[in-house]
Amino acid sequence: MTLSTPIRSAESLAAEVAALFDTLGTPASALAGGTLDVHSPVTGERLAALAETDIAGVARAIDAADAAFAEWRLVPAPQRGELVRLLGEELRAHKALLGRLVSIEVGKVTSEGLGEVQEMIDICDFAVGLSRQLYGLTIATERGEHRMMETWHPLGVVGIISAFNFPVAVWSWNAALALVCGNATVWKPSEKTPLTALATQALFDRALARFRDNGGKAPDGLSAVLLGGRDIGEAIVDSVKVPLVSATGSTAMGRAVGPRVASRFGRSLLELGGNNAAIVCPSADLDLTLRGVAFAAMGTAGQRCTTLRRLFVHDSVYDTLVPRLKAAYASVAVGNPMSEGTLVGPLIDAAAFEAMQKALEAARAAGGTVSGGERVTVGAGGYYVRPALVEMSGQTGPMLEETFAPILYVVRYDAFDQAIALQNGVPQGLSSSVFTNDLREAELFLSASGSDCGIANVNIGPSGAEIGGAFGGEKETGGGRESGSDAWKAYMRRATNTINYGRTLPLAQGVKFDVG
């Protein structure tokens, strides 16, 4: 299949990247001469060759962050919030620039690239509010004339490891909270998306300069970007000066990170993709369901951690909904993500395409009927695919594993408890949803006997962009919460204090210990 969508040359994209960095005050020389090649999935061609951080450089950055932490933790939290507020202003002012860069480097359609930057802005706003709400508690004590309380203190250096599918939002989820909590950060972005990380750091540096110009006191070393491969991530994970590591990526990465951090008694927040499902009930609004399923399953070319990958449709509405879904899949606009009207851009690289084809072959071998999934020719390069809808007789084969590609497996069901069991019957537990107008079904889905995922939604697809929510996973998708609600506690250490304001010393639990 060939689409006539116009696409820019690789040279023009590389020139545009250089111009974007020039706007941020980064010289073009910084984009050349290194060993880390950066390719755009839009064309498949090289955009830059960046200098990688060596292991000694990682140690220096962590040492600098640790020194910065010692100063930053003494700055009152609302003042720390002011820095994050200014960061939000810089992101607002440069939203179009950073969003465009996300589209070039990741292949997200224009609205999704801009939406990711808006998510960064939103979390900055959220964190600024939290800077005045880092509350402890007064604790009941059995001792007279005593007060017991809970206090929270800055933790230290926060290591952030991010994946390609959300190249900048992941950083903001963690960094905004880390900064208002009094911590410094070091950031290892995906090897596939270093340009957006460098641009984000440039915006942070602008905010930091404004903060200082306005009289704020902030040390150097509060935020650093470390470019490179697995060895850079391992150095962060193994450093005793990094008490918290927040990592997003594959479950394989999480299995490596979690035990290594735990072995030194560090903390980890793990967000490890998702094999997310939705249930369509007989009472569902099918027009709403169609839109919710289409966006959740096809947006970002199926490469979100919250992508809808499994759909369980009640037998009574299956023959009405699924043909409409097939039509949407066959007609959705696939092409240059920066062209108006495009809804599905490219896969990130050849490996993603090969993984998709392997999953589709496995689905056929398991008796599935595949609609779509073929490669689409767009310009001279890039891996563009028609989203695939796969009808399965049961949950088997590749349905039990996640594939970061636009594949939606569809299965019939008869009873609601059966659908919930299928939804929960995979190792992953990030996000889930149910489409129903039946109150009992909705409430059951949200109950302890319903979805076992970290996010459970009603009448919207699986998602995680709602800023106030505690975004995170369960089971193999990791657990822990990077941002939202009381997630700030992960970025601080808790202490319990007891103050005796009397002239006697009663002991707890009736213990007697009289001396003298």
Image (cartoon, rainbow, N blue to C red):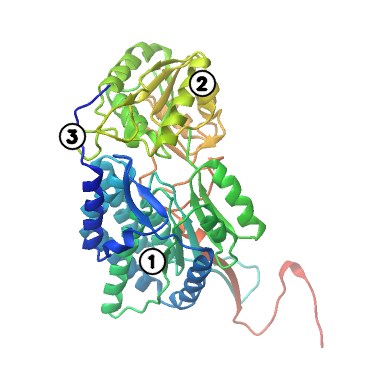
First-in-chain label (3 vs 2):
3
First-in-chain label (1 vs 3):
3
Q: Residue at x 30, y 22 (%)?
A: 329
Amino acid type at circle 2 is: Ala
In the orientation shown, which residue stands out farthest toward the bottom? 516
Residue 55 at least partly seen: yes
Name the quadrant containing residue 331.
top left
Q: Residue at x 34, y 63 (%)?
A: 201
Closer to the camera in the image, 505 or 157: 157
Question: Of helix, strand and loop, which one carries label 3?
Answer: loop
Q: Which residue is mark 3?
A: 6
Amino acid type at circle 1 is: Ser
In the displayed structure image, the side of residue 496 where residue 183 appears, left or right: left
Dot 1 and dot 3 residues touching (CB under 8 Å):
no
Residue 437 at least partly seen: no
Amino acid type at circle 3 is: Pro
State the image coordinates of residue 177 (x, y, percent, origin top left). Answer: 41, 61
Tell me the crowding category of disc 3: few under 14, some 14 to 19, or many 20 or more residues within 10 angstroms, Cα based. few
In the displayed structure image, the side of residue 500 where residue 337 appears, left or right: left
Closer to the camera in the image, 327 or 85: 327
Distance between the Cα atoms at labels 1 and 2?
A: 50 Å
State the image coordinates of residue 232 (x, y, percent, origin top left). Answer: 52, 58
Q: Which mark is residue 131?
A: 1
Tell me the crowding category of disc 1: few under 14, some 14 to 19, or many 20 or more residues within 10 angstroms, Cα based. many
State the image coordinates of residue 217 (x, y, percent, origin top left). Answer: 36, 79
Relative height, residue 164 to residue 503 (above, below): above
Q: Which residue is mark 2?
A: 362
Distance between the Cα atoms at labels 3 and 2?
A: 34 Å
